[in-house]
Image (tube, rainbow, N blue to C red):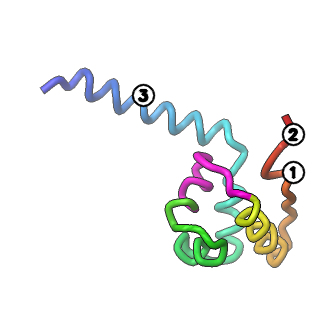
Amino acid sequence: MHYGRLIAGVKKNLLRNLSVLLSYPMNIFKQIRNAAKLTQTQMAERVGVVQGSIVHYEFGRATPRPPAAWKYIDIAREHDMFLTLENLYPRP
């Protein structure tokens, strides 16, 4: 077995995931979910997406499309959190 390649692949994935987490000022999605005291599955039902999409939003791999984004905004407002579309879709 080629452990060198395996270790290099693991390092590459860890670094990529870490850079995504550090570069994306997200976690707003997780903060909203935590404030609402919902599981990822419950949040997915409220937002109208599959649970896997919630994971992608929380890890910065995806941004919700406008219908889901509006639902996130509504949930955030229910819990006295300020969120706008501009926060989710910053201008270039």
* Location of residue 9 by image quarter: top left
| Relative image position of residue 50 (x, y in whole percent) | 53, 67
**Circle 2: element type:** loop
From the image, state whether disc 3 or disc 1 is nearer to you.
Answer: 1
Q: Is residue 56 left or right of residue 47?
A: left
**Circle 3: element type:** helix
Residue 8, label in figure: none
Query: Which residue is outermost to the left?
Result: 1
Pointers 1 and 2 in contact (C-beta within 8 Å): yes
Q: Residue at x 42, y 28 (%)?
A: 12
Q: Which residues are magenta?
A: 54-65
Which amino acid, by three-letter code, is at mark 3?
A: Lys
Q: Quadrant of the C terminus?
A: top right
Q: Write down the residue under mark 2.
A: 91
Residue 12, label in figure: 3
Q: Residue at x 59, y 38 (%)?
A: 20
Q: Using the numbered discs, state the Cα–Cα distance from disc 1 to disc 2 in whole angstroms.
A: 7 Å
* Location of residue 65 by image quarter: bottom right
Q: Residue at x 50, y 61 (%)?
A: 52
Which amino acid, by three-letter code, is at mark 2?
A: Arg
Q: Is residue 55 magenta?
A: yes
Residue 86, label in figure: 1
Q: Earlier in the sequence, mark 3 or mark 2?
A: 3
